[in-house]
Image (cartoon, rainbow, N blue to C red):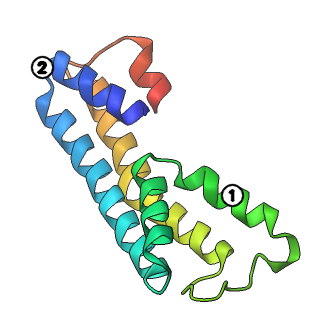
Amino acid sequence: VSDIIMIVKFNMNGQGSFALATLCCVSLNLALQFGVTYLQNKKSPILEQLREQFIVLILSKPGVDVWRYFSKGNDSDKKEKGKVMSSLTEMTAFRVIELVTESIPGSIIQGLAILSKTGDRSIAPVLSL
């Protein structure tokens, strides 16, 4: 959500290149998450596949992964039937994807935007980092 706010702020401040770069990072993150979600659930019924894709679309995957991991207790490292990864491996994979494609590049982009001559000097960009 903070990335969406920053994309809007970048556009409003005439920093379209920073907005586009942030949008590309978010889009790449979502595309990879959709792909991994498809691979993880390709043997599942279609409604379960759609539910999992919807969770990614509404940006709730991190919370759902943590809930699933902790609700399984000692069985969290075991694969469910028809799944490619255990819930722990799935949660870890999604965190790595998010760090590499969105969090780290997004922080660099926002930092550069703040430091640029036309950068927004308000508190919102700093809090978004």
Please identify the residue farthest to the top as the structure is shown: 122
Identity of the residue drawn at 58% across and 73% down? 90
Please identify the residue farthest to the right as the structure is shown: 74
Q: Name the residue that disc number 1 marks.
A: 66
Left or right of 25, for residue 51: right
**Percent position of residue 91, x then y:** 60, 67
Left or right of 115, for residue 99: right
Q: Amino acid at mark 2?
A: Gly
Q: Earlier in the sequence, mark 1 or mark 2?
A: 2
Identity of the residue drawn at 27% across and 20% down? 9
Name the element at disc 2: loop
Identity of the residue drawn at 37% across and 65% down? 34
**Percent position of residue 7, x then y:** 26, 30
The label shown at residue 14 is 2
In this view, 3 is above or below 86: above
Name the element at disc 1: helix
Count neighbours of disc 2 (C-alpha within 10 A) and say few if under 14, some if 14 to 19, many if 20 or more.
few
